[in-house]
Amino acid sequence: MSHVESPIRQKWVTNTDYYKQVSDDVFAPIEAKPNKWWLLGTLFSAAVMAMGFAFIGWTVWEGIGAWGLNPTVGWAFDITNFVFWVGIGHAGTLISAVLLLFRQQWRNSINRASEAMTIFAVICAGAFPIIHMGRPWLAGWFGPLPNTRGSLWVNFNSPLLWDVFAISTYLTVSLVFWYLGMIPDFATLRDRLAKKGKKIGAAVYGALSFGWEGSSRNWSRFEIVSLILSGLATPLVLSVHSIVSMDFATSVIPGWHTTIFPPYFVAGAIFSGFGMVQTLMIITRKVYKLENYITMDHMESIAKIVLATGTLVGFAYMTEFFTAWYSGVMWERYVFVNRAFGPYGWSYWIMFSCNMIVPQLFWFKKIRTNMTLTFIMSIFVNIGMWFERFVIIVTSLHQDFLPSSWTMYTPTITEYGILIGFFGVFFTLYLLFSKFLPVVNIFEVKTLVRNPKKPVDLEVTVKS
Amino acid sequence: MKKDFLLGKYWNPDALMDGLAALQKQGQLIYDVYTPFPVHGIEPFLGIKRTRLSVASFIYGCMGALTALTMMGLIYGVLWPMNIGGKPSLAYPDAVPITFELTVLFAAHGMVLTFFIVGRYWPGKKAVLMDDRQTDDVFVVAIDKKKLDDEAAVRQIFADTGAYEITEKEVDKI
Amino acid sequence: MNKPKYWKSIDELKQTPEYLEEARKEFPTDIPMSQTLENVKDEDLNLSANRRDFMKMLGFGITAATLSACVEGPVKKAIPYVEKPHDIIPGVANWYSSTTPSGIPVMVKTREGRPIKLEGNPDSSLTNGGLDAIGQATVLSLYDQARSKAPKSSGNLTDWGAIDTDMAKAMADIKANGGKVRILSGTILSPSTKALFGEFLGGFEDGQHVTYDALSASSLAKAHESGFGTRAIPSYHFDKAKVIASFACDFLGTWISPVEFSSQYTKGRNPDGSWMSRHFQVESLLSLTGANADMRATIQPSNMGKALTSLYNKVARKTGKGELPGGSSFNVGGNLLDKIADELAAARGESLVVCGSNDANHQLLVAGINDMLGNYGTTLDIANPSHMKQGDDDAMAALVQEIKGGGVDAVFIYNCNPVYDHAMGADLAAALKNVPVSVSFANTDDETSKACKYHTPDHHYLESWGDAQQTAANYSLVQPTIHPIFDTRQAQDSVLKWMGSDQDFYAYMRAQWEGLIISAAEEDWDETLRKGLFSMPTATTEGIVFNAEGIPAAASASQVGGGSEDQFELITYAKVGIGDGTYANNPWLQEMPDPITRVTWDDYVTIPFAYAEANGIKHGDKISISGAGVEEIALPAYVQTGQAAGTIGIALGYGRDGEAAGKVAAKVGGVNAYKLNNGAKVSISKTGGKYPLALAQEHDYTYDKSLVGIMKSFGMEEDADRTEEIIKETVLPLYKSAPDAENDYRESQSKYKDKKKHLLSLWESHFDDPATMRRIHWAMAIDLNKCTGCGACVVSCQAENNVPVVGKQEVMDRRAMHWIRIDRYYSGNPENPDTVFQPMMCQHCDNAPCETVCPVLATIHSDEGLNQMAYNRCVGTRYCANNCPYKVRRFNWFNYTNGEQFTDINPAQNDLGRLVLNPDVTVRFRGVMEKCSFCVQRLQEAKLRAKVNQGSSLVKPEPNFRGYTACQQSCPTGAIVFGDRNDPESEISKLWSEDNERKYLALEEVKTLSSVAYLTKVRNRTESEYEEIKEEKHNEIYS
């Protein structure tokens, strides 16, 4: 709709005069031969993934005893990773859905990659509730399946069951949303490859494109569908992490039993999600030379969101302390003092500095626009958010009610292995995505191209 | 069945809009317009009504909610009331999250399925193209030759509004 | 009128010859011979089978059947009774009365012919149905792989015949040339056995029976010999003593007859009774008894004599008796001795002074004090002495010398292991080599039997006949409950055989009883055997006078001086769980946390807190110990609060010879403290090495001083110690005067009870409406006053519920599987703290946090108030355990029944050990959560019994049944009460009534509505004592 564009509006696509140019740039990695850096990267992360799976195998073979858990600290790395990855999985849908609702055009060029990130993250997250089970082969029992034992259904009161519903809904819906958005791009790719005479590619992407033609009728339905999907996805995003937070909020354990958790977790999720978006985008735009579409303005707006949410989260931390003190409940009070100054105080301060203090640097434009710094900070954010979940889970459990049962928790090599292994899973998936699928939503970016020039290879046959 | 089409091809969406406006003034019925990205404001020229997919998804959503509530209500409320943690067997607040999730699940998937069905999309469907660049950087106005009363005028309109090419093509279309 | 004639077919109607022919045939159609028989002549074919064919068929059939029977089918383990024994009903337990080796009358629960559980005999007037941890565990020793499986002669397996011939010859020779024969044994409770041995020895010119005890009380008997002329140990009556002064005497844990004493002791500890006993403890190490004392002071063992003399004189002054040399200047714990003297004197004839020291002088002084107070005849009974310890150390020493000197022709060692558990064991082992005939009856290949020529293994007591006489008046019987597992023979039977008698011991014993014991009371043998108990009228104490002339000598002899600064006094002591080390190979006992130190699976040296602080010694620092008469040893340190300065403690019962005692004992290792000289002056030093101890309770976090500092700056220091929310304590005067037993939560509740009821819960309980009130609502109450922390319940629960043994590493990882644990909390000055024990098991909350969070409904609530756990449904998310405020849920981290890292320790991994498993309880698989079930299988049994008796569907089981749960059953003090809360008849309903001031729930404010109530601990202290100690406690935490 470029013709109704007001000239003072911010430009989200720089020095691009031809629509084709967008396709050329975005499809470059797909059409080109895989370069060796990509190969190396993929192989490496695949290896890491394999190691992770080996450790998971060991756990399943040996039993949860292979981890450092004990009756007092029944969850640690497993659920920490779960919540961490779910959190990561929030930026994508948020960008594609919420920003679409708010008509934020800068989403157009980053939504594809971040949605991909979402899906891969949620896949990682979804694995943990199963891995952490004592008898993972019975995971099917989470489903509300009728059986011959009459009343033996699932427990609809259990937040863990809500998780099952939330995560599965979230995964499938964002998967659909993601795929739907790719259909027109697949069509473009199909036709390009067909023109280039690349039969297999054309066939494959043709099949994926569902025979998209781009007729106005399709477009009008398509846009409504995406709009409603984002309308559905927005509350879904919020619900998912609220429900995850209820795993803790509905319990009786001091430090978990808090009504602040849903908003606090959602803010944290967006924060960590955007942190990961930063990490990925900075690499992606550099490696695939997409600076024209993922511009400095994009990175800046992301940084601003990180700053905002980071501060929110920090505020939540302090609110928790205030509430604990104000409640006068000795258990609460003790847990929070212990959280910050007890044996696991170090993890608390890692969390606090990474999530609360580091993002404050984003107040300065110089830093927002310095990609190296931003990258490093985004890593800090990821670390900080992982530790947030660790702090919440372990420090609350390891010294709860009965002093007789207080204990420390020390992770084993297996747990580290699984933790690292899932970064392998995540990056393997992302690298494959970046090679075989359009990392930028072409057709939406094209809508941002202003006053396009006539394609050079187009000869005019009409005289007027 | 085979159809003959008169195609006006543009490389600039603004020009396309002008062309469509002129054609409408001429009273020419347009078969369809093919664009690489959604160009807003085309619908009126083609007389496309707003889709009712939103209504569909609302209905699907209601179905989801109903499923969740009846299931939980039956199991805990009617068939097998249980004492779980001393709470009332059917505690309504506990039913909220699952009800919500199922609502979204049904609404989203139901709607997308309907979209694929009404738009007749399926994996591996063969696309019928007016121009092999229509999904990339070319905007094609297609006019069914049978519905064409004054071909010259139409060609003229195309020419005046800056179509770079005017061709005819016979393709397999409903 | 003529009836109609019916017919079925035309043929029948017409009666055609074909039809008649057919009708006469056996089979309406021909048997198809041609297919079954190959070599049939054609003419045979048209007629039906003749005799030959029948024979052929028969032959074929049998052969075929035989051949098919030769095919190996799947092996089926379940063997049905072809002919059901009349006394065995599959699935229903049989109970037999018996007696443990330590003389505790028990009922043996057998299922399908195998003993699986021991329970104290509830009719016993001694123990009132209690049973200690060791007693509970003896059933597992029956299935011990390390038991000797056949007789040995000079180390080689042989058979009984050979041994008997050898012995017959040997005995004959000795008789011929008048040789010396000695029987060396531990205390023999069995009168019949003693009679038998006497008879056996009588057959020789010089036969002697020498008795000693690994945990000796010899000097106590000696003291009474000099006091009363008869060598005997009086029977004690702690239940009659209003003031108990105990000097280093662990009578609740290990001294003489702990189960008996525990049940007596707690009778006097009821704050609601007319009086509550006041218990002073003066000791060096923190013992179980000291942990339960009202007032406690520490003392170096070398000062014990002085203390006793000083006390003697103080009491003498009060009672107007003659004082002794040594004066009364010495004192402990400020002026505690004066206090003790005052209160003893105030309660003459109703007080009791006991001393654990094995020094005859000390015991004589104590006897003197008791005599001055006129306690003999009331709280001590010398006329009806206790037989629990019959050892005579002097005789033993003499015997060892005699054997060393040679000239002893035969030594029979029965019911003891001197090579291991006697100071001169090594000498004995060496000396035994020169004894022509040395026989050991031990039922394991223990250290002694290795040193003997012959090893004729005895039955386990659960396989044997026998009897016991605990005191002069109390008898009980032992009967076999299982066919002997190995090729062993009861020692008494062997002796009878070698005497040339063809009688077996059962006949001998029965003759003894019918002749001497029950004939007096005209009791019937079978009835007595059924009850397993028998008691004589007690003898009168009239005319027994105490002869005090030995006392001054004793006093002056015990004025030896205290320890120096750099020197430590080494104390060897017995642990509640390990005892004398006989059961060192019993994994249940090794895994049972020591009540005081909470250490499992390890030997260690206890270091006084103050010294450890000053020298930076931590748990598990290796300490090397050396000194006069002690070759250098190294042990991990355990920093013990409440231990006298200048003392170190090393437990007995460790350091068993690996292949002698068995795999478990070998795993534990340690130092054999019997070889150390008790009371030796030693010096200790850190080797710098570390050795991790497996603590079942990491107490180090309770008061993190730095945290307290921070909380102080927030003005929240009071919140640092939350134990008071779990443990409620008060003292007698306050309990009597103030309402609500100082339980502030209760106070606040009573405020809100009426006007703010709606604020207490969001929804109405499932148990409120009258319909459910008519049902059973199981509940438990645990009296913290009665719980001595002995740990019997832990082992009992383990036996009842097939709780796996997980071993040291897992315990170190805090993964002990015990369903019931005894939390131990200290308060006050670490140099002499107050101790409180709290048994903690699943609280079966009516608002159970665990139930709400389980995604698969593996744990839900029964309408009888039980928090049920469905193992098969559990997928192991561990969410329930996280959400349990009491942290009582136990997760199967590994496959304990198969994992190779548990093979050596978990009895459930070998076919023999598996026999002890309770068939009524599932063995849990890995990845499954488990927890206390309130012994639901036993509750079910009780309900069924009630159904049978009442025949109604809405049954009310026995209101005051002592055997509902395993922990309740074995508790020697009856601290655990269980029953139906809705039954007004039951004791539990009274304890649970709102006007029971002492009743409180742990973490009541979390509103879990737990079904386990605790009764506030009431210490018998004056308010002033209370105040100063309270002050001390407060400073200890918050300063």
Image (cartoon, coloured by chain):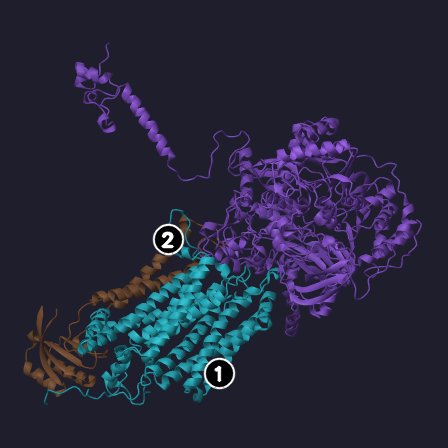
Chain colours: A cyan, B brown, C purple
Residue shown at 65% from the left, 63% from the top: C620
Q: Which mark is residue A174?
A: none
Q: Residue C535, how many percent across, how many down?
A: 73, 34
Spatial CA distance of label 2 from label 1 is: 49 Å
* Left or right: residue A352 compared with residue C646: left
Residue A317 in percent (x, y) is at: 52, 74
Type of the residue with mark 1: Gln
Which image quadrant is residue A185 in?
bottom left
Quick one: A58 or A131, which is closer to the camera? Answer: A58
State whether residue A329 appears in this view: yes
Give the vertical position of C441 relative to B14 (above or below). Answer: above
Residue C249 drawn above or below residue C611 = above
Residue hosting label 1: A360
Q: Is residue A303 above or below residue C722?
A: below
Q: Is residue C633 left or right of residue A347?
A: right
Q: In the rendered image, which quarter contains the C terminus of chain B?
A: bottom left
Residue annotated with mark 2:
A145
In the figure, residue C650 lies in which quadrant? bottom right
Q: Examine the rendered structure and indicate whether residue C552 appears above or below residue B49.
A: above
As drawn, is A364 to the left or to the right of B115? right
Chain letter belonging to callout 2 = A
Whether residue C375 is visible, yes or no, is no
Task: Find numbered disc 2 in the image and state the secondary structure of the residue it sits on.
Answer: loop
